[in-house]
Image (cartoon, rainbow, N blue to C red):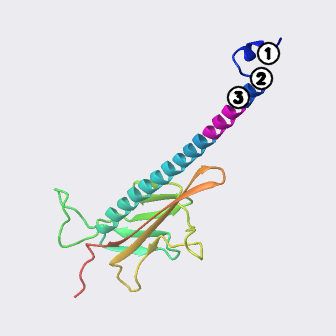
Amino acid sequence: MKHTAFRSRGVTLPEVLLGVSVLAFVTFGALLALVGTLSGWATGQARIQAEVDAQRALRRVTEALEEAMWAQVDGDGMGITYHLPTRDGSGSIAYPLVWDGIERRIELAGTVLRICDNGGCQTILTDVTTVDPNRSSGGYTMFVAPAGSTVRQVTVQIVVRRTVRPGHDVWARTRESVRLRNVPQLF
């Protein structure tokens, strides 16, 4: 008599249990697909944000170095010291070119890329790494200047590593050659 309600409609208890089991499997599969999609979404968002941050930092470095009249790359290639020319009252570069007397640096301090001058240092990017997983040697050089006594061009590369969740990182790389526009001409 227990199963009378099911029998009167032509459905047996095993059929109900089978239906509930199928529904549970379908729901579980949908939840797994949702979790996988959300995980992929989070990874994609982290990668996009890392790329945007790296590009923004490279733009700041490029803008600073383009106006330089002198630059010297550190021996390890992870920092650069540069001089800017004096500006007149309207903010334009004064000619003849003369150094403004402020020594400036762009350097990697741990995992922080920063721009420094007499007023202190300003962070422009975090999570910078000295390792590039796409290189067989693993390491890379952030600032590279061609051989010679006068630096007129510097190649800048920045690699960022962000952790999405433990054991899962995303990487962003950006690279550009910068021409120092205000290097005095030697005659």
SS type, badge 1: loop
- Which residues lie in the magenta part? 21-31
126 or 43: which is nearer to us? 43
The residue depicted at 34 percent of the width and 67 percent of the height is: 65
Instruction: Residue at the far right: name it.
Output: 1
14 or 149: which is nearer to us? 14
Question: Of the residues under marks 1 and 3, which one precedes in the sequence?
Answer: 1
Mark 2 residue type = Leu
Q: Which residue is mark 2?
A: 13
Q: Is residue 167 above or below residue 143?
A: above
Separation of disc 2 and disc 1 at Cα? 7 Å
Residue 41, image x and y in percent?
52, 46
Q: Badge 2: how crowded within 10 Å, few (<14), some, or many (20+)? A: some
Mark 1 residue type = His
Mark 3 residue type = Val
Q: Which mark is residue 20?
A: 3
Q: Which residue is mark 1?
A: 3
